[in-house]
Amino acid sequence: MVVEQIDNPANKQMSYGKDRKPVGVIPLPQTLPKKTIYSGAEAKKQNNELQRDLYMSEKAAKKKPIHKFPTIMKILLGFAGISGLIIFRKNISKMIRNLFRRKN
């Protein structure tokens, strides 16, 4: 024999309050939901309106700020470049001379 939720002794012992229904009781809907039937032209029109609204709201939205390259990084890269040139100046000068040397 199947015991329904409302007749289950475990549910009767639980306190649901005076105005709350016990677990397991689902009220029936008063009316069924109405189905809306759209034609292809109506659906296309609504889709176009939605797309236009989205486009206009994105166009009016504030643009995200574009971050520039950090100044400290510019300074560090410049310092690293200059120190590299100082350290490897002999090797760099040899490479440049070899590029312009005439081959006989």
Image: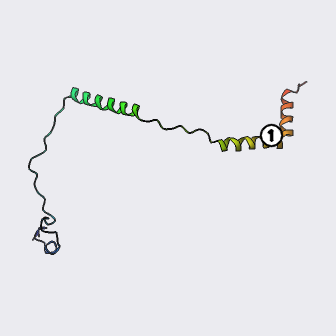
Horizontal side of residue 43 vs 94, given as left or right: left
Q: Is residue 8 above or below residue 57?
A: below
Horizontal side of residue 19 vs 86, given as left or right: left
Q: Quadrant of the N terminus?
A: bottom left
Question: Which of 44 and 18 lies nearest the eye of the viewer?
Answer: 18
Q: Is residue 16 above or below residue 69?
A: below
Please identify the quarter of the rendering in which residue 99 is found. Answer: top right
Residue at 83 percent of width and 41 percent of height: 86
Residue at 83 percent of width and 37 percent of height: 92
Q: Position of residue 15 (x, y in %)?
A: 17, 72
Q: Quadrant of the C terminus?
A: top right
Horizontal side of residue 79 vs 18, given as left or right: right
Q: Which residue is disc 1 drawn over?
A: 85
Instruction: Describe the element under mark 1 as helix, strand or loop.
Output: helix
Say which amino acid is labelled 1: Leu
Question: Which of 76 and 36 lies nearest the eye of the viewer?
Answer: 76
Q: Position of residue 37 (x, y in %)?
A: 16, 34
Please identify the quarter of the rendering in which residue 21 is found. Answer: bottom left
Question: Which of 21 and 56 lies nearest the eye of the viewer?
Answer: 56
Q: How is the image coloured?
A: rainbow
